[in-house]
Image (cartoon, rainbow, N blue to C red):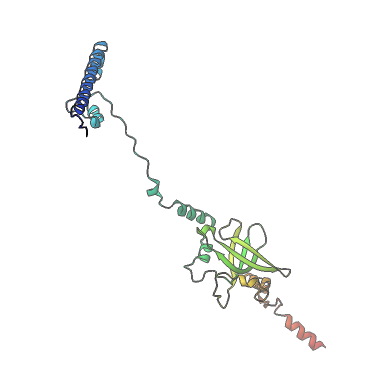
């Protein structure tokens, strides 16, 4: 046999809730009356709210009354995302402007420049703290930001292959010059196969010396690629004539 719940039980809960609300309201009224009797200055200093008072507009209503100071509102800070959308690129450009004020190295390695440096060319790197270094460009490393780019040079010292990485925008690098361009372009971006003896170019010191003589001009520019003077042939002819 099923038991049917009595409808009187929910009504008793509702009566208990109404009774509790009535008791709390009576206690609030008693506390307000006692505070007004004990502290009469509160009624004049803090007047009761105006009719139609809403807590969401409490500040607006209280500030409009006379004798009240307006609360200063501090504006929100300026958004850094709007002022500088890409801070890394901005910092990189500022550093490049300091390290390369003329923009020569930027144009030398720019992918948009048709006369840019390419693998296989002979590059001369002038350093601030030592002798210049030259070699064949094996690879150009372009990573992340342009300030992180580098170039790999290969040369021979006392018939021993030597390779060195140089940062393009390094403070130790004073300048870079192309000594000779490769006549036939390689179909690779990295010429690591030149490390093998079969494809090794060897020392490029002779080409660098000839390039320096042509730049200096004067009597030293008359020397040919072998490093002899232009008047050396006349001396040989004189010797032959004497004999």
Residue 24, given in percent of the width and then of the height, sits at 24, 20
Residue 203, given in percent of the width and then of the height, sits at 68, 71
Which image quadrant: the N terminus?
top left
Who's the residue at 37% across and 41% down the image?
77
Residue 34 sits in quarter: top left
Is 23 on the left or on the right of 151, as rendered? left
> Which sits in the foreground, 192 or 63?
192
> Which sits in the foreground, 108 or 188?
188
Residue 191 lies, with reference to residue 30, above or below; the image says below
Residue 51, given in percent of the width and then of the height, sits at 16, 26
Q: Is residue 12 visible?
A: yes
The residue sitting at the right extreme is: 243
Q: Is residue 101 visible?
A: no
> Which sits in the foreground, 221 or 92?
92
Who's the residue at 51% across and 59% down the image?
146
Residue 54, given in percent of the width and then of the height, sits at 21, 30
Is 228 on the left or on the right of 146, as rendered? right
């Amino acid at each position: 046999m099923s038991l049917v719940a009595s409808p009187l039980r929910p009504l008793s809960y509702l009566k208990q809730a109404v009774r509790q609300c009535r008791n709390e309201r009576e206690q609030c009224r008693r506390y307000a009356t006692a505070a007004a009797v004990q502290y009469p200055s509160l009624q004049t200093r803090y007047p009761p709210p105006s009719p139609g008072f809403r807590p969401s507009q409490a500040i607006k209503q209280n500030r409009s009354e006379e004798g009240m100071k307006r609360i200063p509102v501090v504006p929100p800070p300026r958004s850094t995302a709007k002022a500088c959308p890409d801070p890394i690129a901005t910092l990189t450009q500022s550093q490049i402007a300091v390290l390369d004020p003329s923009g020569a190295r930027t144009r030398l390695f720019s992918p948009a420049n048709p006369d840019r440096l390419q693998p296989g060319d002979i590059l001369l790197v002038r350093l601030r703290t030592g002798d210049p270094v030259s070699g064949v460009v094996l690879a150009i490393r372009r990573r992340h930001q342009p300030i992180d780019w580098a170039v790999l040079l290969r040369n021979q010292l006392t018939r021993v292959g030597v390779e060195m990485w140089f940062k393009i925008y390094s403070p130790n690098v004073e300048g870079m010059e192309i000594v000779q361009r490769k006549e036939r372009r390689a179909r690779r971006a990295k010429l690591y196969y030149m490390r093998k003896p079969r494809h090794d170019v060897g020392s490029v010191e002779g080409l660098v010396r000839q390039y320096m003589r042509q730049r200096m001009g004067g009597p030293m520019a008359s020397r040919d690629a072998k490093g002899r003077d232009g008047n050396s042939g006349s001396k040989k002819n004189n010797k032959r004539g004497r004999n």
